[in-house]
Image: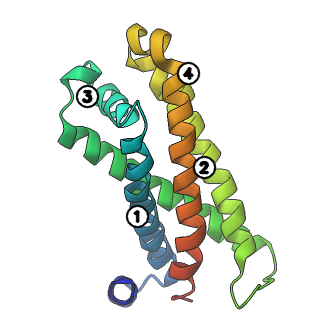
Amino acid sequence: MLQHVLSAVAAVDTAAGVGPLVGRLVLGAFAGLAAAVMMDIPMWRQEEGYTPAYIAASVLRRVRPDEVTFLDANVVHHVAGALAGVLYALVHLTVDFAVPDAPLFGVDVFPHIVAVLAVVPSIYALFSYFVLPRAGRGIYEERATAVRGQWLRSAFVFGVTLLVLGPALFAGIS
C-alpha cells in the first residue's frame, strides 16, 4: 500500500510539474489521516469515546453534539487529521530547509521530531481551548477535564504515529 501511495504522489508531482512540495503535502495529509485512524483506537477505548469528534462536528455544524451523526463526527475527525498532517509536512519542510541534514540510520529525523512537537500541542490546544468551549455549557462545565484528558491521550497516539510513519513516507521522495 505504501508503495502505491508513493507512486501516486510521484505521478501527481510529475503531472502537475510542481515538484516535491505538493508530494510532501499530500504525504503529510496521508500521514495525518493514518494517524487519525490510529487515534480511533484510544478514542473507542476511553470513557468519553468519540466525544471530541462529536464536539468538533457540532461546532462546525452549529448544532448540539447529540444532534451530530456518527458519519459527521467521523468525517470531521479524519479530515482534521489530514489537515494536521499537512501542518506536519509544512513544519517538516521548514525545519528541513533551515537546519542542515543530520541523518540517523539514513533518515533525517530532526525535522520529523520538531514537526511532531509542533503539531501535537497545536491540535491539543486547538481542540481544548477553542473548540471545546464552544460546545455548550453542559459539556464544557461538566466534562471538560475528562474530555481534555482523553483528547491528550489520543493526541499522543497521533504524534507517535506521525513520528513512525512520517520518516517512512518522506524517505520515499526527494
Q: Does label 1 or label 2 sit earlier along the sequence?
A: 1
Figure quadrant of the N terminus: bottom left
Indicate the secondary structure of the residue bearing disc 4.
Answer: helix
Quadrant in the rendering for residue 66: top left
Residue at the (57%, 86%) spot, across then down: 171
Q: Position of residue 85 (x, y in %)?
A: 49, 60
- Which residue is labeled 2 in the image? 120
Disc 1, SS = helix
Residue marked by disc 1: 34
Q: Residue 139: image x %, image y %?
A: 41, 15
Q: CA distance from mark 3 to mark 4?
A: 23 Å
Could you tell me which residue is drawn at 51 percent across and 37 percent down?
A: 151
Asked where in the image residue 54 lies, by quadrant, the reply is top left
N-term-proximal mark, 2 vs 4: 2
Q: Secondary structure at mark 3?
A: helix
Q: Is residue 85 left or right of residue 122?
A: left
Give the residue displayed 41% in from the left and 71% down from the top. Answer: 26
Q: Which mark is residue 145?
A: 4
49 to 91, vertically: above or below: above
N-terminal of the pair, mark 2 or mark 3, is 3
**In the image, residue 147 lies at what x, y percent?**
48, 27
Which label is found at residue 50? none
Q: Label 3 sits on what residue type?
A: Arg
How far across and down, in percent of the image, does residue 79 sit? 34, 51
Task: Name the mark nearer the viewer: 2 or 4.
Answer: 4
Q: Amino acid at mark 4?
A: Thr
